[in-house]
Image: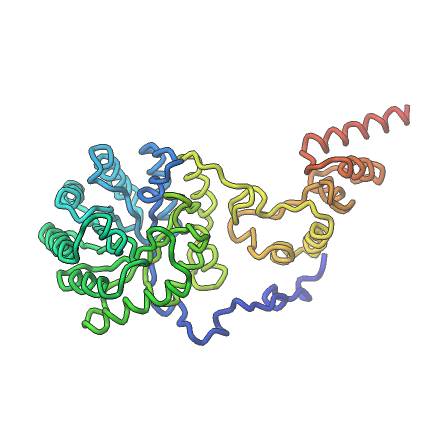
């Protein structure tokens, strides 16, 4: 083992082109208030392939959500009926019993029925609930629904006034914002803030936006608010992943001036899903932009996967089974050398852009058809088995005849076979 006094700091071994200190156009997130909004229990379970979790499963998901330092959570759509009302009410009661440090929100159409359903829960529980009232705003939606701008403005005013009357903070959500015209957004945003909404939510409802579009739209919204003297109004970004840009767009939205970012665990949601909140948080942690304790990130994703019956792809970042596994000889040899230097951070970074130990995971060396003998030796040593030269060569030869990674059972069968052969030879 190398003397720790001679070991370099891992930061000195990686030149970081991602470092924001080299990007003068950005103000660090720690210099401004940024929050995160979990949509897993509302937009996430609107996925056509998921199961609606039981109340007990939702409670555990809520507990883990709060443990991650996520600031607010959408608990559901009470306007959808009694089952939703009962679950939202019970989740708030659970959150209060457990002392969870998280703000409550609910989705609602700009309809009296939906908003009153949220208000009734707020009165019953005695807790503040922010209404995320949504209304389509794009030309394609207006044409399809036979709506006029006057219709939209009337619904916006009515929803904001009802929320104020019933003592509910409101976030005005323009559906399909990323395909809406600046002329319409100007009118709707101005109307909403004039009637007291606390936040505006820019929605990439169908996953249309590219990073340039995100930057332009968030900048437009911020400039509009400043121009009308409402720069204190918050700006949310809510993205979907249809182009595979969900996480990237989340980060760009932050850079452009959004102060609340939405997402779901594992990116579940309608069609191909929402922006992945777990990947967003992981990336911001790696960039040094947040200091949240993310030790619950993997359990959170696993709890959502189990509750919603969503299989986690083996190669899903951080959480997937293969995220920190390797059987490739060259890669494994480098990881093993790093491990033998007694430096966990070095081992985590030599062939991984994500340090496994930050998130409660570890590097895993396997044995397969592309492995070297060092893989075999390490595998055996890790399990307290003497890596005799004959045994190493026997397992290595077996691996080279397969088309897959050897399972623990397959390797142990070779160990037992070698042991039995040694005993016969010595008898």
Nearer-the-camera pick, 400 or 323: 400
* Left or right of residue 421: residue 167: left
- Residue 113 position, x and y percent, is 14, 42
Quadrant where the C terminus lies?
top right
**Residue 228 in view here:** yes
- Residue 412 position, x and y percent, is 72, 31
Q: Residue at x 73, y 48 (%)?
A: 329
Q: Residue at x 39, y 72 (%)?
A: 27
Indicate the quadrant where residue 236 lies. bottom left
* Left or right of residue 413: residue 184: left
Query: Is residue 411 positioned above or below 365 on the image?
Result: above
* Left or right of residue 137: residue 424: right
The image's colouring method is rainbow
Query: Residue extending furthest bottom?
Result: 24
* Left or right of residue 370: residue 201: left
Query: Is residue 388 positioned above or below 194 on the image?
Result: above
Query: Is residue 300 positioned above or below 352 on the image?
Result: above
Indicate the quadrant where residue 418 lies. top right
Q: How many marks?
A: 0
Q: Residue at x 33, y 51 (%)?
A: 205
- Residue 401 position, x and y percent, is 77, 35
Q: Residue at x 63, y 66 (%)?
A: 13
Nearer-the-camera pick, 363 or 264: 264
Query: Residue extending furthest left?
Result: 165
Quadrant where the N terminus lies?
bottom right
- Residue 324 position, x and y percent, is 60, 48
**Residue 281 in view here:** no
Query: Is residue 361 positioned above or below 57 on the image?
Result: below
């Amino acid at each position: 083992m190398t003397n720790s006094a001679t070991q370099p700091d891992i930061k000195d071994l990686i030149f970081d082109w991602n470092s924001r200190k080299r990007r003068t156009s950005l103000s660090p997130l720690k210099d401004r208030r940024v929050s995160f909004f979990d949509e897993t229990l509302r937009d996430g379970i609107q996925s056509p392939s998921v199961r609606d979790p039981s109340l007990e499963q939702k409670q555990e998901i809520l507990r883990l959500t709060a443990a991650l330092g996520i600031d607010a959570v959408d608990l559901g759509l009470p306007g959808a009926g009694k089952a939703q009302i009962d679950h939202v009410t019970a989740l708030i009661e659970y959150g209060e019993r457990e002392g969870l440090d998280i703000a409550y929100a609910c989705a609602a159409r700009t309809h009296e029925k939906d908003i009153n359903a949220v208000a009734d829960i707020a009165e019953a529980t005695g807790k503040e609930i922010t209404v995320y009232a949504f209304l389509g705003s794009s030309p394609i939606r207006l044409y399809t629904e036979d709506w006029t701008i006057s219709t939209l403005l009337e619904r916006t005013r009515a929803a904001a006034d009802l929320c104020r009357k019933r003592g509910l903070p409101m976030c005005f959500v323009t559906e399909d914002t990323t395909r809406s015209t600046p002329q319409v957004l100007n009118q709707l945003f101005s109307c909403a803030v004039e009637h007291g909404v606390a936040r505006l939510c820019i929605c990439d409802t169908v996953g249309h936006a590219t990073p340039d579009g995100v930057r332009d739209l968030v900048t437009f919204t911020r400039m509009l608010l400043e121009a009308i003297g409402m720069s204190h109004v918050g700006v949310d970004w809510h993205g979907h992943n249809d182009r595979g840009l969900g996480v990237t767009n989340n980060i760009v939205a932050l850079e452009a001036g959004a102060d609340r970012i939405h997402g779901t665990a594992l990116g579940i949601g309608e069609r191909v899903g929402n922006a992945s909140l777990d990947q967003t948080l992981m990336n911001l942690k790696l960039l040094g932009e947040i200091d949240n304790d993310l030790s619950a990130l993997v359990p959170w994703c696993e709890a959502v996967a189990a509750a919603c019956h969503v299989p986690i792809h083996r190669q899903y970042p951080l959480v997937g089974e293969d995220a920190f596994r390797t059987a490739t000889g060259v890669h494994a040899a480098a990881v093993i050398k790093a491990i033998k230097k007694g430096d966990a951070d070095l081992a985590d970074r030599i062939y991984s852009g994500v340090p496994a130990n930050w998130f409660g995971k570890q590097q895993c060396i396997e044995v397969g058809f592309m492995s070297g003998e060092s893989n075999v030796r390490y595998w055996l040593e890790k399990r307290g088995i003497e890596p005799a030269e004959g045994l190493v060569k026997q397992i290595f030869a077996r691996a080279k005849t397969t088309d897959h990674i050897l399972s623990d059972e397959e390797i142990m069968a070779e160990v037992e076979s070698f042991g039995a052969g040694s005993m016969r030879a010595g008898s």
